[in-house]
Amino acid sequence: MEQQGQQPGFWKPSHSPWLVAFSVLLTTFMQVLDTSVANVSLPHIAGGLSASTHEVSWVLTSYIVAGAIVLAASSWLSSLFGRKRYMAFSVALFTISSMLCGMAQSLPQLVLARILQGIGGGGLQPLAQAVLLESFPQERRGQAMAAYGMGIIVAPIIGPILGGWITDNYSWRWIFYINVPIGILGLVMQNMFLEDPPYLKRENASRIDYVGLALMVIGLGAFQLVIDKGQDVDWFADIWIRFGTLVFATALPAFAWWELTHKHPFMNLRLLKSRNLSVGTALMAVQGAVMMGSTALMPIFMQSLLGYPAFQSGMAMTPRGLGSMLSMIIISRMVAKFGNRLMIFFGFVGLAVTLIVFSGLNLEVAPSNIMLPLFFNGLAMGVTFVPLTTLAMANMRQADLQQASVIFSLLRNIGASVGISLMFTMQARMAQVHQSVLTSHVNAYGERFHVWADQVGRLFQNPAAAFGLAYRDIAMQSVLLSFMDCFRWLAYTSIIAMPLIALFKGSRHIKSQAELSMME
């Protein structure tokens, strides 16, 4: 007999849905936490592994790209192996690779462990969302999604604080070791409470689009290698960069062609014929690049130039998460009053303005002058996310929502990875450019420099001290100017993307679910 208030055919798990929810949210929270927990620890990781700031960016990008690829394959993998088995494998791999991250003795070892960590964690978010929607009846799904949403929002807030505290008081290695007991607990609970619903059909392995999957992995891998490694080897002067460029320039168009013509595509790119989805995906990729690019730069700016310890820099990043949380609370009312397109416009304006403010920071800036713009930056990011997602998915048939969500999330992750890589590359390159320009103004034969050098030399009783002090100041000013350039370019990127908002179809052109059902 069906329980009162449940829709016909509703499957009920054997255990309390809240036990099921806690078991999957525990590991999902852990995975989301790892996207931000390493940001404030990057200078310590670089020092501990004898790597440059640019090289250590691979710790972030390798995790994001690996997770993006697995995210795209998560629906296939759960259908092939069964959701419970695939989730157990993902949690186990994430836990083991977290331990390997903490044990890494070199940067290549850490990057390899982070790739494995991304492979393990990439599918946890969509799996957790599917499990929650299935475990709760229709009238209680709002509570489940609220718990899921708060976990996704709170984790990035806690990440920098927790990462900074652990790094300052113990070691950066413990930001990875703490995943081990959490992963084991989650694995035990999921084994006890999680079960596959009877209607979940197992996919025939022969129907999986292995060619499309291989082309995507090869293309994205080569692309990430080029943008990450190019700065270190002077770009196209290196044969491997030229080869990598040839590979991704061939593989990615081939992937697009294959997916558009294959009968059972790995990723249904034909959905991008929807103008709202294609525009929304492009804007989400820009937002991902701007958000993660600035998120990666800010802690390094505070630690390397302002002298903040890791914990203080993590605390300084907290207002950004609080701004995002506040925006999630008020966004539904704002959309009802102003509409989706106008809210997206306000969000991108807010991103541009706050990034312009960051481009005017100096070495004597007070913490409040960083934290207040960060709050409004997080507010702007939250304001864009919900209406952007709503408009992008507005004209999607229910049967296509999962594939559309995969494309949308994949491009967001790729945008984030590109933003991080390009910002670290440009910061390193512009520091060299500014140092060359500033050095040209230090003329040993100039009268003003001689007067200043004589004063410094008498102060330190060593004439050579003037040149050492001048070089130190020039180097610091060069790095400062390079960070300011990066924040300014991110602001310009937000401004350039704004005209795309006008291409969205408004509410008058959005079909209802009833109309879409008639089209199926």
Image: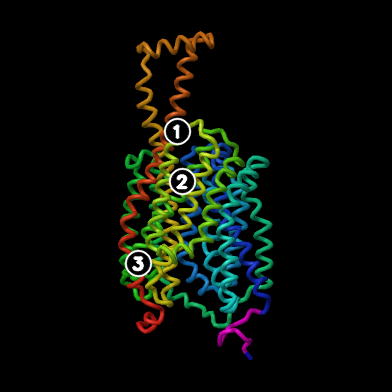
Residue 43 lies in what quarter of the image?
top right
N-terminal of the pair, mark 3 or mark 1, is 3
Tell me the residue that label 1 is attached to: 480
Q: Measured from the top left, where is residue 148 in percent x and y?
A: 58, 65
Secondary structure of the magenta portion, mostly? loop
Q: Are marks 3 and 2 in contact (CB under 8 Å)?
A: no
Nearer to the camera, 161 or 412? 161
Q: Residues within 10 Å of mark 3 (few under 14, many from 20)?
A: many
Give yes or no for residue 72 being in the magenta stretch: no
Q: CA distance from mark 3 to mark 2?
A: 27 Å
Residue 360 image-quadrant placement: top left
For this view, does 355 lie left or right of residue 160?
left
**Image quadrant containing the C terminus:** bottom left
Q: Looking at the picture, which amino acid does disc 1 mark?
A: Leu
**Residue 282 position (above or below residue 275):** above
Label 2, residues with CA under 10 Å away: few <14, some 14-19, many ≥20: many
Q: Secondary structure at mark 1?
A: helix
Q: Which residue is mark 2?
A: 294
Query: Which amino acid does the dot numbered 3 rest on?
Result: Asn
| Classed neighbour count for the residue bearing mark 1: other residues with Cα under 10 Å, few (<14), some (14–19), many (≥20) | many
Please provide the residue range marked out in magenta: 2-13
Judged from the image, the secondary structure of the residue bearing numbered disc 2 is helix
Question: Helix, strand or loop at disc 3?
Answer: helix
Residue that mark 3 sits on = 276
Where is residue 375 drawn, in percent x and y? 52, 48
Tell me which label, 1 or 2, sits earlier in the chain: 2
What residue sits 47% from the left and 28% below the top? 476
What residue appears at the point 36 percent right and 38 percent down from the top-left corner?
234
